[in-house]
Image (spheres, grey):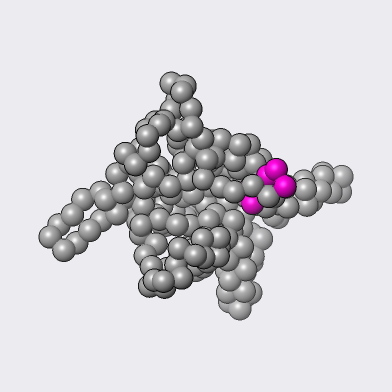
């Protein structure tokens, strides 16, 4: 665990914040490079990406604070210290989709087309962010004695590096979506596949997580994964059966 990347006098660079910033930078570069192929205006891509990241971070932070409400009751300013960690992806998904969709509708830009466009990039950015989780020591896995275990400084035993497992899974999903995405695909198909694959990945990896509470034998992210998986699967099946 290495939560502070480096310090320069009064300036502290946190590992988590650094990797989030890296994810944003990589996303912007890839969006501009892919824009012409998918007939997306570069300014449109940059503006939509900015709104997506800001709203996604707000939603992710909001859900984390709700889940850990007691930790912030005495220090509400701590809610703003996201560079130290504390983001929930499903909260970011809800916040990002809702606010960005409203923004795109206001601008008169194609919502599903941009969802397809950003899906491979979002998976890659999410994977980079999970590396930040590893350095920060959050989102850790269950206790283990296997060779895959790692020991964080504040823990007396080794745990599964679930953050790195998820990062690897997201990189694989991203690579697949980059190849799967094509201007000829049915509108929304890449986005639905992204949600389907990630919900499966997250559901499975939650069994290795050691920091989440269970509700009726499953964690909250697992219930949310099921809530996405079922309707998205029905949508894809419906698309396959339609001409």
Q: Which residue lies at the image location 49% right of the left edge and 65% below the top edge? A: 70
Q: Position of residue 223 (x, y in %)?
A: 69, 50
Please state the horizontal and vertical placement of residue 83, each as a whole percent of the image.
35, 59
Give the residue displayed 56% in from the left and 47% down from the top.
212
Q: Nearer the viewer, residue 120 or 140?
A: 140
Q: Left or right: where does residue 185 sit relative to residue 68?
A: right
**Residue 175 visible in rendering:** no
- Left or right: residue 94 versus residue 157 is right
Q: Is residue 103 above or below residue 224?
A: below
Q: Is residue 158 above or below residue 99?
A: above
Instruction: Give the residues drawn in magenta, as a range.
Output: 216-220
Up-down relation of residue 45 to residue 106 (above or below):
above
- Front residue of 54/29: it is 54
Residue 241: name its quadrant. top right
Asked whether residue 25 is drawn in magenta, I would say: no
Q: Quick one: 113 or 26, which is closer to the camera?
A: 26
Q: Position of residue 101 (x, y in %)?
A: 62, 69
- Give the residue furthest to the left: 9
Q: Is residue 89 left or right of residue 133?
A: right
Give the quarter of the figure containing the N terminus: top left
**Place of residue 158 in the rendered image (x, y in percent of width and height, measured from the top left):** 41, 30
């Amino acid at each position: 665990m290495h939560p502070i990347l480096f310090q320069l006098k009064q300036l502290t660079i946190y590992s988590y914040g650094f990797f989030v910033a890296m994810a944003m930078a990589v996303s912007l570069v890839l969006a501009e490079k892919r824009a012409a192929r998918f007939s997306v205006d570069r300014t449109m891509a940059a503006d939509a990406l900015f709104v997506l990241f800001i709203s996604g971070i707000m939603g992710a932070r909001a859900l984390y604070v709700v889940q850990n409400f007691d930790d912030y009751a005495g220090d509400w300013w701590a809610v703003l210290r996201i560079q130290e960690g504390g983001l929930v992806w499903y909260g970011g998904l809800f916040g990002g989709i809702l606010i960005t969709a409203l923004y795109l509708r206001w601008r008169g830009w194609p919502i599903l087309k941009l969802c397809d466009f950003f899906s491979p990039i979002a998976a890659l950015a999410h994977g980079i962010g999970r590396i930040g989780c590893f350095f920060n020591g959050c989102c850790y896995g269950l206790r283990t004695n296997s060779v895959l275990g790692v020991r964080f400084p504040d823990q007396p035993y080794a745990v599964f590096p679930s953050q790195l497992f998820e990062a690897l899974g997201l990189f694989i999903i991203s690579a697949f979506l980059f190849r799967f995405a094509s201007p000829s695909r049915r509108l929304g198909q890449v986005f639905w596949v992204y949600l389907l694959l990630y919900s499966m990945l997250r559901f499975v990896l939650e069994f290795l997580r050691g920091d989440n509470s269970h509700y009726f034998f499953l964690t909250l992210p697992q219930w949310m994964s099921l809530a996405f998986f079922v309707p998205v699967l029905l949508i894809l099946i419906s698309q396959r059966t339609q001409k």
